[in-house]
Image (cartoon, helix red, strand yellow):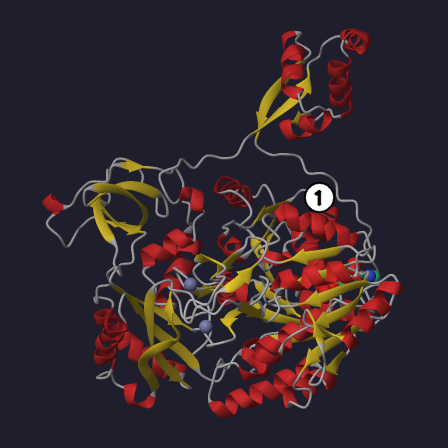
């Protein structure tokens, strides 16, 4: 058989097609490797998808590839199959999906080379030579002593710990031929040290259940109340897989990846894990990917995109806090990491564990359909159960920076008892509304349909959607009135107020403005870890995942808005947030409390939140969804368009709708729109949507299968662009 001469490549472009080039048929063809390709007037990087002897086109007009970048596949056969599935399921251009699934570092033309580490050792030099250094050069001696204790040698990082100016010292030692270095490809792992806690009967039962099916595909939902020891079960399952020489991907939401968790994994498994999250550089993330790929480490611990780590012996995927919204990628290639992970597990015939104290309604519904196994943990192995949520009716209350007198009384009680207090307020900035009392004028963003938030620390008004800035006005822009006031409370104002009121108590604030880096977050979490009384204020960032045993009171300041949201998801989200926040309290050796300030204490959902357990509420919410015919009892696909004028966005969707309408089965779907999106103007562009909703998933897929080939041809431009959102999060 003659060798292939042509190949198809995926290129990162928003086009639903692949590109053909001629290849050198003397070199081996590597499917899944990157090549440099001539493209228009420039050069692009493409991933080789398949090769063949023939081409449909005139061979003379097919351009040859310029260069082969990789000696082996950066997307193996399994990953390519997963990528194809994603492209097909989410109806996203294959090229964009392919490049989404490789490390950012490799998306251009950078070489893919294994990570090597320099390791320094002592030579066989005379022991006396070293001893003689003790008096003459104590710094050289210090390092030699450290190297003596480490026959395997030390890396630059280790040496830096001993002496920040190690470089000069090593140079001197090298000149004396006392030390030498060599490249190593496999850093040595430090030894795990942790003593294992004795599992509770409940934990033990769940572990046995899951372990009995580790050799095949299954989706396990670990539905355990906050602090019930889910993480402990993940760690046991990982140990089990490692013992079978398999690898594990362990995903957490961005904010769940704290030092605390990293330390827990390290103390259990030593250094045999790689970390990947958005706080690392592209190079660091690539190195983590590469170490995992080569089997040098067995665990990939990371956030959403770590799911795309490839390896030869994947044996388990864990998704912690599976309900968390950060698993959904909302821009570029839209996908849900949990759902893609389930597909990946199915393709590899391996188990996947989803864990949460507040599982998503869709996962609960999948348990009811018996496609997932549900495992419950109802007790905390520590002494006290999570506290019930107590409602504080604040209809007639006076507020100081958003807190009622009753709230202060509770906070003070807990501080006096040496407890830590967590106050959840999901609104950053100083005040969310700036307006004129005289004429009702409000400070609005010029690019978005939204209000400007006042930020006092930087003395500006800020739009949280587009980042637009504006000076705080001194007079009303509309009527010239001399006084412009602010209303409502953000975390910045709350912090200021609490600092004045509790001058002797440390006040820690955790939100996007106060946490510029992971280090800032680390230092605050360390303070919590110390167990000293303090007040922690924060947004979403503090709601989940953390385990700080000294917190004895959780306060939720303002959740009322969620009761009247236009989103059908808001009740689910509210219930999850409230249970997560209240579950941060009472994890140690003291019973916790959780309180919620509300003006709507009689509201049925508030009543339910205070009286029932999350699972009962979730079942009620599912009932409601079923009656309304909303997900998870229906599937949603949304076509979105955005343009410099609303008219153009709507017209683009009309064009798409005209292609959908003649399809067989279209009449049986519900089709809503085109209509302006809820937030019509955002970052200077008008947004519109066309929503397809169907109880019958096959019907929806069939309509799309008939029409997508044509819809995909509809060009987008910078003036008006369109995209498709499968399993859209909201309507
Ligand atoms: P979750 O992941 O469900 O929030 P964790 O696994 O973090 O729960 O456990 C909560 C706390 O209980 C942690 O401090 C953990 O060390 C501790 N813990 C978990 N399992 C046990 C056990 N079997 N015995 C004693 N303590 C445990
Ligand atoms: Zn005015
Ligand atoms: Zn804006």
Q: Residue 30: which quarter of the image?
A: top left
Q: 163 or 72: nearer the eye?
A: 163
Q: Nearer the viewer, residue 116 or 580?
A: 580
Q: Residues within 10 Å of mark 1 (few under 14, many from 20)?
A: some
Task: Give the residue drawn at x 44%, y 69%.
Answer: 450
**One can see residue 599 in this view:** yes
Q: Is residue 681 left or right of residue 121?
A: left
Q: Position of residue 360 (x, y in %)?
A: 58, 75
Quadrant location of the N terminus in the rendered image: top left
Residue at screen point 54% across, 83% down: 564
Q: Indicate the quadrant of ligand 3 in the picture.
A: bottom left
Image quarter (top left, top right, bottom left or bottom right) of the C terminus = bottom left
Residue 276 % position (x, y): 56, 48
Q: SS at mark 1?
A: loop
Instruction: Left or right? Give the position of 68 relative to 219.
Output: left
Residue 380 visible to an observer of this rendering: no
**Residue under pointer 1:** 270
Q: Nearer the viewer, residue 681 or 376?
A: 681
Q: Quadrant of residue 424?
A: bottom right
Residue ID at (70%, 78%)? 597
The residue drawn where x is 78% and y is 7% is 136
Is residue 630 shown left or right of residue 21?
Answer: right
Indicate the position of residue 689 as horizontal and vertical percent values: 34, 75
């Amino acid at each position: 058989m003659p060798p292939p001469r042509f190949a198809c490549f995926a290129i990162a472009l928003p086009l639903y097609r692949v590109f053909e080039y001629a290849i050198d048929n003397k070199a081996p063809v590597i499917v899944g490797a990157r090549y440099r390709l001539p493209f228009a007037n420039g050069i692009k990087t493409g991933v080789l998808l398949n090769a063949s002897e023939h081409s449909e086109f005139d061979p003379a007009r097919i351009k040859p590839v310029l260069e082969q970048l990789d000696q082996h596949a950066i997307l193996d056969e399994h990953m390519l199959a997963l990528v194809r599935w994603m492209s097909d399921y989410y109806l996203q251009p294959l090229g964009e999906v392919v490049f989404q699934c490789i490390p950012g570092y490799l998306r251009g033309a950078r070489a893919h080379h294994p990570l090597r580490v320099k390791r320094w050792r002592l030579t066989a030099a005379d022991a006396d030579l070293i001893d003689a250094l003790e008096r003459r050069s104590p710094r050289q001696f210090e390092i030699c002593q450290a190297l003596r204790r480490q026959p395997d040698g030390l890396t630059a990082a280790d040496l830096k710990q001993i002496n920040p100016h190690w470089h000069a010292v090593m140079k001197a030692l090298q000149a004396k031929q006392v030390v030498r270095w060599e490249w190593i490809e496999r850093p040595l792992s430090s030894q795990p040290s942790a003593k294992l806690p004795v599992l509770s009967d409940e934990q033990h039962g769940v572990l046995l259940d899951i372990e009995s099916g580790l050799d095949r595909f299954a989706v396990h939902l670990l539905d355990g109340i906050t602090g019930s020891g889910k993480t402990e079960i993940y760690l046991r399952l990982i140990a089990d897989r490692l013992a079978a020489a398999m690898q594990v991907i362990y995903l957490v939401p961005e904010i769940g990846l704290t030092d605390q968790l990293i330390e827990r994994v390290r103390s259990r498994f030593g250094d045999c894990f790689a970390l990947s999250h958005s706080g690392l550089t592209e190079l660091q993330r690539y190195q983590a990917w590469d170490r995992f790929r080569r089997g040098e480490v067995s665990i990939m611990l990371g956030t959403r995109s770590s799911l795309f780590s490839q390896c030869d012996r994947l044996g388990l995927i864990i998704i912690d806090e599976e309900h968390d919204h950060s698993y959904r990628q909302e821009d570029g290639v839209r996908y849900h990491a949990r759902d893609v992970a389930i597909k990946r597990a199915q393709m590899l015939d391996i188990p996947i564990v989803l864990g949460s104290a507040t599982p998503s309604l869709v996962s609960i519904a999948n348990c009811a359909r018996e496609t997932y196994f549900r495992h419950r943990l109802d007790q905390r192995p520590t002494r006290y159960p999570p506290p019930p949520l107590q409602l504080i009716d604040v209809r007639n209350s006076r507020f100081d920076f958003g807190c009622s007198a009753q709230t202060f009384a509770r906070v003070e009680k807990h501080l006096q008892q040496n407890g830590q207090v967590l106050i959840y307020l999901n609104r950053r900035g100083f005040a969310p509304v700036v307006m004129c009392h005289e004429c009702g004028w409000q400070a609005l963003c010029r690019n978005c349909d939204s209000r400007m938030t006042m930020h006092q620390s930087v003395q500006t008004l800020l739009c949280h959607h587009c980042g637009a800035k504006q000076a705080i006005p001194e007079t009303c822009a509309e009527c010239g009135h001399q006084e412009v006031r602010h209303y409502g409370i953000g975390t910045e104002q709350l912090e200021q107020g609490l600092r004045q009121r509790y001058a002797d108590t440390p006040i820690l604030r955790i939100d996007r403005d106060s946490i510029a880096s992971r280090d800032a977050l680390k230092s605050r979490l360390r303070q919590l870890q110390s167990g000293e009384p303090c007040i922690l204020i924060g947004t979403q960032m503090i709601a989940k995942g953390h385990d700080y045993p000294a917190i004895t009171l959780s306060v939720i300041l303002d959740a009322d808005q969620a009761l009247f949201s236009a989103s059908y998801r808001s009740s689910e989200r509210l219930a999850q947030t409230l249970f997560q926040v209240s579950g941060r309290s009472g994890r140690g050796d003291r019973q916790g409390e959780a309180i919620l300030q509300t003006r709507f204490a009689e509201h049925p959902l508030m009543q339910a939140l205070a009286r029932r357990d999350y699972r009962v509420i979730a079942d009620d919410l599912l009932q409601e969804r079923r009656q309304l015919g909303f997900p998870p009892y229906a599937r949603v696909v949304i076509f979105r368009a955005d343009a410099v004028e609303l008219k153009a966005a709507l017209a683009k969707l009309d064009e798409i709708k005209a292609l959908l309408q003649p399809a067989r089965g279209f009449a049986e779907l519900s089709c809503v729109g085109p209509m302006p999106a809820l937030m019509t103007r955002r970052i200077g562009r008008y947004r519109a949507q066309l929503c397809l909703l169907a109880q019958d998933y096959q019907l929806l897929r069939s309509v799309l299968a008939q029409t997508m080939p044509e819809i995909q041809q509809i060009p987008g431009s910078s003036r008006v662009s369109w995209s498709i959102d499968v399993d859209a999060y909201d309507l």
